[in-house]
Amino acid sequence: PLMYVAGGKGLAVFDVSTPLQPRPVGEIIITGVIPLYGPVALCLNGKDYLYVASVKGLAVLSLCDPMKPQVVWAIADDSLVASSGAALRLVEDEAHGEALLYVAGGWGVSVYGLSDP
């Protein structure tokens, strides 16, 4: 199993198959939306995508190779999340047949349809 950790302007991947001895895997991934300081929220969409939200914006990373996530979409938007905190929640909208990504922070809540992640 893997663990994704955001901070210091990048995303790190850790192998946690030995729970008491996590070890880093690969290089730090620069997403363009992770700040040096401030809140960052991560959310997994099953095993396909990792969503990252912060005071700098929102990014979607492909997990085709889970040890080397690749940014497939990003938006620099400092109005999504305030410096007071960040939260992401992925919800399946069965009525409309798509997933919804809720991005919450000090500025309110934004909702993104994920028919195309």
Image: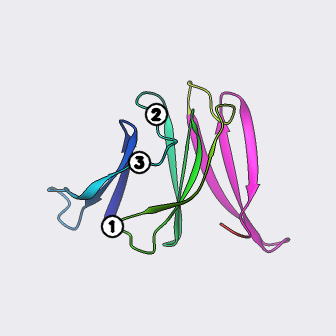
In the drawing, what numbered circle is on residue 30? 3
Q: Is residue 83 left or right of residue 16?
A: right
Q: What residue is drawn where x is 66% and y is 39%? A: 104
Q: Residues within 10 Å of mark 2 (few under 14, many from 20)?
A: some
- Closest to the camera, between mark 3 and mark 1, is 3
- Determine whether the residue tagged by mark 3 lies in a helix, strand or loop: loop
Point out the tag, 2 or 3, that comes first from the N-terminus.
3
- Determine whether the residue tagged by mark 2 lies in a helix, strand or loop: loop
Q: Position of residue 26 (x, y in %)?
A: 25, 60
Q: Position of residue 61 (x, y in %)?
A: 51, 60
Mark 2 touches mark 3? (CB < 8 Å): no
Q: What residue is drawn where x is 52% and y is 42%? A: 33
In front here: 99 or 36? 36
- Within the magenta stretch, is there residue 11? no
- Determine whether the residue tagged by mark 1 lies in a helix, strand or loop: loop
| Distance in Å between CA atoms under marks 2 and 3 | 10 Å
Q: Quadrant of the C terminus?
A: bottom right
The amino acid marked with disc number 2 is Pro
Residue, disc 2: 35
Point out the tag, 3 or 1, that comes first from the N-terminus.
3
Q: What residue is drawn where x is 47% and y is 48%? A: 31
| Distance in Å between CA atoms under marks 3 and 1 | 14 Å
| Distance in Å between CA atoms under marks 2 and 1 | 21 Å
Q: Is residue 95 left or right of residue 22?
A: right
Residue, disc 1: 67
Highlighted range, magenta: 86-115
Q: Position of residue 89 (x, y in %)?
A: 62, 52
